[in-house]
Amino acid sequence: MRLVSAVLVAVLLVLGGGCADDPPAPDAAATRGAADLDLLLERLETIHPEPFHGVPREEWVGELRELQDRLPDLSPDQTVVEVMRLVALLSREGRDGHQFALPQPGHEGPMLPLRLYFFEDGGQDELVVTDAMPPYDDLVGGTVTALGGVPVEELLTMTEPLVPRDGPATVPTFQPQFVLRTEVLRGLGLMTGDTIRVSVELDGSETELDLVPVAFEEHEAWAGWLGVLRLPERPDTRYLRDLDEPLTWERLGSALYVRLTEVRAQPEPPLERAVRERALDRLVLDLRQNPGGDNHNNAAVVALVSDFQDRHPEAPVAVITDRVTFSAASNLTTDLERLVDPVFVGEPMGGGLNFWNDVTWVHLDDLRVPMQVGVSTRYWQQAADPADPRLTIEPDVPVTVEAEDYFAGRDPTLDAALGVLP
């Protein structure tokens, strides 16, 4: 209806010449963008079995209509931010953290030349620079206190509504990548020129400088495609060594330590033989920094843990999770809770117990910045109780991640997992 109306107005203006009292013709780009948002609503209701599980339909459609009306007044970057906000609203109550709204490949804006991660210090989350491209290397280890002249607490409040989520722990997992995107910073009014001022507290002093963004492709080549989620590799920390190796294991005294960084590797015969060693009295399965993969591989991991328990009935099992434990990795965590009853150590996982996934990408080609929106098609119910109200698994032994430990190569979470297993 909006597109037909626009065509009718254009025809009347051509035939009648128009007059001073005639309303102005609609902005053509905004009209096309409004049609794209109509398409999003249509595809959402066609593809997603329960699209409005987290927000009333009338509320969400009202937000969509308001955005359509505002499109003529929005810049391209503001449009990106508002579409992100609209899509994230669908998962505000959790269980739909895969429904991202992002610029289409080739249309991404530049990125800040940093890697950021949340660490907890005294009960407060701090946004810390974990890596930086030259010439900003000196910022590594520093805490971001302001960006674009806006205190970081306010910045996080501004970006939080843009983040899709399975639960509360999903937000600190994904939020840093929104902070690094210049289209988000421009869309929020924090960046107007070619650089942005950052304030970083390091070694008790405050440093301010202007960051020059780099092309999206350059940032991805430097940090890796998971670099906006994960911590950088550290050879002195077991769970951060060789992150491209999806499955590793080693003996730690009488314990077997197994690390899974991606859900795609089947347990190999050497690991199966290791599980059967009689001298073992504990098993630690580390799922930190594991954003998922193919959950059809989870059954083999569960079978491996079950085999260990069968052969070592008195030996406890610990599973370590953190905020990056997501998607298929959170499916695995939930399977393990249901089937083998381990001790959970670390942070709550960023993924959910029961959640929507298997997204189909809907392309919005006619927005001022072409975007793609992931629309979920399947509900993964892994918890023992289909009505389980939990959005994540709270660890039996909670251990917070502090920047001081990370940069020193210490791993108190693994120490705690080994310590709670007699």
Image (cartoon, rainbow, N blue to C red):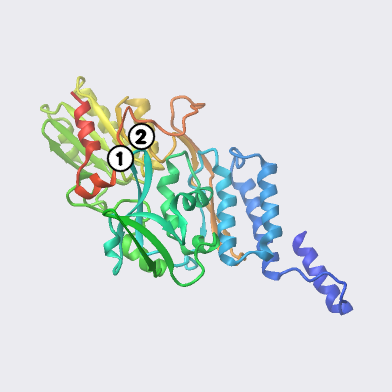
Task: Confirm whether residue 343 shows in the render.
Answer: yes
Location of mark 2 (residue): 333
**What type is the residue that disc 2 sits on?**
Thr
| Near-viewer residue (238 or 329) | 238
**What type is the residue that disc 1 sits on?**
Leu
Sequence-wise first label, 1 or 2: 1
Q: Quadrant of residue 277?
A: top left
Give the left or right position of residue 218, taking residue 246 as reference: right
Image x and y of residue 336, in percent: 34, 30
| Near-viewer residue (341 or 111) | 111
Q: Residue at 40% of width from left, 37% of height from top?
A: 331
Location of mark 1 (residue): 287
Image x and y of residue 11, in percent: 83, 74
**CB-based contact (under 8 Å), mark 1 and mark 2:** yes
Checking the image for residue 371, the label placed there is none
| Near-viewer residue (351 or 190) | 190
Image x and y of residue 225, in percent: 36, 58
Image x and y of residue 414, in percent: 22, 36
Q: CA distance from mark 1 to mark 2?
A: 8 Å
Q: Residues within 10 Å of mark 1 (few under 14, many from 20)?
A: many
Q: Residue at 44% of width from left, 43% of height from top?
A: 170
Picture mark count: 2
Q: Quadrant of residue 206?
A: bottom left
Look at the numbered disc 2 and give the secondary structure of its residue.
Answer: helix
Look at the numbered disc 1 and give the secondary structure of its residue.
Answer: loop
In the rendered image, the quadrant that contains the C terminus is top left
Q: Is residue 411 above or below residue 134?
A: above
